[in-house]
């Protein structure tokens, strides 16, 4: 009987120990799309970190903002563009990770690749200075061109240089016109240049303005659009690709996105950057069919200016109650097993210099895109963001009016006027929201 009591006592003690251990398990919530945090990696992390329950939450920034206001947002979040840090910092929603990063075991401060990571350091006015709010999961030279060599050859166009950028005015435009194919009815069969117009345009306009020493804003606060004819012409440059059927439009819609059109031989040139090369590797004969060229310059003699779109990365919620545990997840994601695997697959330039050697260079295709990406990186400048809006809000007034422009119910100048009016109203409302 005494032996039985002892057995029961041991069992009870074990139950208490297991119960206490279970109670100590900390939940870290991570707002991110599944493609950027697959379940098998979540399972691997938890197997190696038994004290953390890592929960992926589907990305929904509207819900996250509501939760943040209520004080209960996800601990980590995937920031679509690093320049949006200015918007969320202004509202006190991001955790200053500087001390955590300075004490990192995986991420070392002197290993951070500042070429592509500067937008995650922000002092309230400038990037690359002040507090650290995270890091990009990887970065890309979004202005880099990918083109179909077979289409170039068929059109009698020479391959593009891998080291000397072509010009926006007028080489890219003229190439787009020449490579566009229509059938007898005027329906576009192949777009000469299909770009990610609903997302990329402000970044490209920013580069072109910066190369001329111009601001796309009329005020130092960046809350009023610049009506200078030289700046208006930059917006018009991109709009005319759509108007002239060189890129998709309401007359010739792309039912997917720019990358899908290019992969399915519906476009001759696209502008998406290094990361797109990994996706293209699913296409048969990719290594000989597709070519790479550096980000174009404005015109002959213009300085080179490129950007990363701000780079997609991971930040932390300012009111998280599990900062230390969330940082362990963050470090693993950046430079641990998941970060290492991401670098090996070549989906982006890693944030840590020590991981650059892992980028694939197994053939001329991968060597070319890597060399161009690293060279473009020497000319990175953060795009001319405004802290009053996020980049996804930026083009609402563009998309609201571009169909009317294509249909010819408004002129190009009326289109720019409407675009500016919409943005200026958005800036005005945003400033009122933050008490300015």
Image: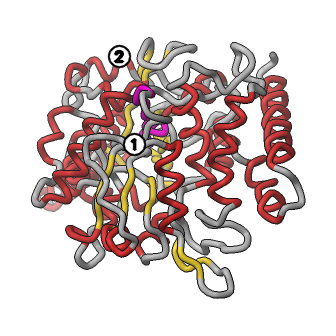
The residue lying toward the viewer, choosing from 166 and 224, is 166
Residue marked by disc 1: 295
Residue placed at 80% from the left, 57% from the top?
Answer: 405
Q: Is residue 164 left or right of residue 219?
A: left
In x, y percent, where is residue 143?
Answer: 43, 45
When the figure is inspected, residue 188 is found, relative to residue 371, above or below; the finding is: below
Residue placed at 34% from the left, 49% from the top?
Answer: 22
Write down the quadrant of residue 41 in the picture.
bottom left
Q: Is residue 52 left or right of residue 56?
A: left
In x, y percent, where is residue 393?
Answer: 69, 43
The residue lying toward the viewer, choosing from 215 and 150, is 150
Mark 2 against mark 1, which lies toward the viewer? 1
Q: Secondary structure of the magenta portion, mostly?
A: loop
Question: Is residue 112 found inside the magenta-colored segment of the image?
Answer: no
Residue 321 appears in the figure: yes
Q: Is residue 244 left or right of residue 142?
A: right
Write down the quadrant of residue 71 in the picture.
top right
When the figure is inspected, residue 119 is found, relative to residue 18, above or below; the finding is: above
In x, y percent, where is residue 202?
Answer: 61, 40
Q: Secondary structure at mark 1?
A: loop
In x, y percent, where is residue 330?
Answer: 34, 38
The quarter of the rendered structure image containing the C terminus is top right
Q: Tell me which segment is drawn in magenta.
A: 302-313
Q: Which mark is residue 99?
A: 2
Residue placed at 35% from the left, 35% from the top?
Answer: 325
Q: Residues within 10 Å of mark 1 (few under 14, many from 20)?
A: many
The residue lying toward the viewer, choosing from 249 and 113, is 249
Q: Secondary structure at mark 2?
A: helix
Q: CA distance from mark 2 to mark 1?
A: 36 Å
Question: Is residue 306 found inside the magenta-colored segment of the image?
Answer: yes
């Amino acid at each position: 009987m005494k032996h039985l009591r002892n057995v029961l006592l041991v069992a009870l003690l074990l139950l208490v120990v297991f119960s206490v251990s279970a109670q100590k398990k900390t939940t870290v919530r991570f707002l991110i799309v599944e493609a950027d945090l697959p379940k098998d990696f979540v399972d691997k992390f938890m197997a190696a970190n038994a004290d953390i329950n890592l929960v992926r939450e589907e990305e929904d920034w509207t819900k996250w903002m509501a939760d943040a206001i209520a004080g209960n947002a996800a601990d980590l979040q995937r920031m679509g563009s690093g320049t949006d840090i200015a918007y969320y910092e202004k509202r006190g929603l991001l955790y200053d990770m500087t001390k955590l990063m300075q004490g990192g075991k995986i991420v070392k401060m002197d290993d951070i690749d500042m070429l592509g990571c500067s937008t995650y350091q922000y002092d309230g006015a400038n990037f690359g200075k002040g507090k650290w709010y995270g890091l990009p999961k990887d970065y890309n030279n979004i202005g880099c061109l990918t083109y179909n060599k077979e289409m170039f050859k068929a059109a009698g166009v020479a391959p593009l240089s891998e080291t000397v950028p072509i010009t926006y005015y007028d080489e890219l435009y003229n190439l787009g016109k020449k490579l566009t194919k229509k059938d007898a009815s005027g329906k576009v069969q192949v777009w000469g240049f299909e770009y990610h117009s609903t997302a990329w345009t402000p970044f490209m306009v920013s580069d072109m303005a910066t190369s001329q020493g111009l601001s796309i804003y009329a005020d130092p606060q960046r809350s009023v659009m610049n009506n200078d004819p030289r700046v208006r012409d930059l917006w018009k440059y991109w709009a005319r690709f759509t108007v002239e059927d060189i890129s998709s439009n309401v007359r010739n819609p792309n039912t997917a996105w720019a990358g899908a059109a290019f992969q399915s031989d519906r476009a001759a040139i696209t502008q998406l950057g290094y990361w797109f090369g990994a996706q293209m590797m699913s296409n048969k004969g990719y290594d000989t069919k597709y070519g790479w060229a550096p980000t174009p310059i404005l015109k002959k003699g213009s300085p080179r200016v490129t950007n990363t779109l701000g780079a997609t990365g991971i930040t932390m919620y300012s009111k998280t109650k599990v900062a230390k545990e969330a940082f362990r997840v963050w470090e693993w994601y950046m430079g641990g097993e998941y970060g290492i695997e991401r670098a090996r697959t070549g989906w982006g330039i890693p944030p840590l210099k020590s991981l650059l050697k892992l980028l694939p260079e197994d053939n001329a295709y991968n060597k070319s895109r890597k060399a161009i990406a690293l060279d473009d990186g020497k000319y990175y400048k953060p795009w001319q963001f405004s802290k009053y809006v996020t980049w996804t809000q930026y083009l609402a007034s563009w998309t609201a009016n571009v169909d009317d422009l294509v249909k010819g119910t408004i002129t190009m100048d009326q289109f720019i006027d409407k675009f500016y009016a919409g943005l200026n109203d958005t800036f005005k409302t945003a400033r009122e929201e933050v008490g300015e």
